Amino acid sequence: MEGEVQRAVEQAAQQMADRRSFLRKAAVGVAGGGM
């Protein structure tokens, strides 16, 4: 049971990190006129 919770937390953290890097790339693209 504990392992499942740990995995879920790690997955959520990974998704948040992915979203953050995606938003950063999008912001850089907009700032650089790359859209």
Image: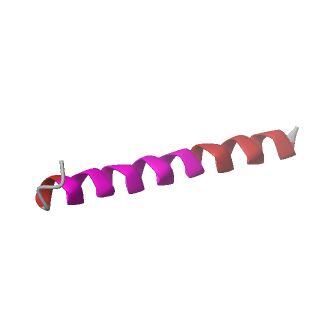
Q: Position of residue 26 (x, y in %)?
A: 27, 50
Residue at 49% x, 51% y: name it.
18
Total labels drawn: 0
Residue at 54% x, 45% y: name it.
15
Dominant SS type (magenta): helix
Q: Is residue 7 left or right of residue 14?
A: right
> How is the protein colored in the picture?
secondary structure
Q: Is residue 22 left or right of residue 9?
A: left
Residue at far front of view: 34
* Image vertical order of residue 7 relative to residue 32, above or below: above
Residue at 21% x, 56% y: name it.
29
Pick the front one: 21 or 32: 32
Q: Is residue 25 magenta?
A: yes
Q: Position of residue 31 (x, y in %)?
A: 12, 59
Toward which corner of the image does residue 8 lie, by quadrant? Answer: top right
Pick the front one: 3 or 32: 32
Q: Is residue 31 left or right of residue 13?
A: left
Pick the front one: 30 or 24: 30
Toward which corner of the image does residue 33 lie, by quadrant? Answer: bottom left
Residue at 85% x, 46% y: name it.
3
Q: Is residue 26 left or right of residue 3?
A: left
If the image is split into quadrants, where does the N terminus sit?
A: top right
Start and end of the magenta stretch? 13-29
Q: Position of residue 21 (x, y in %)?
A: 40, 56
Q: Position of residue 4 (x, y in %)?
A: 82, 40
Q: Is residue 15 magenta?
A: yes
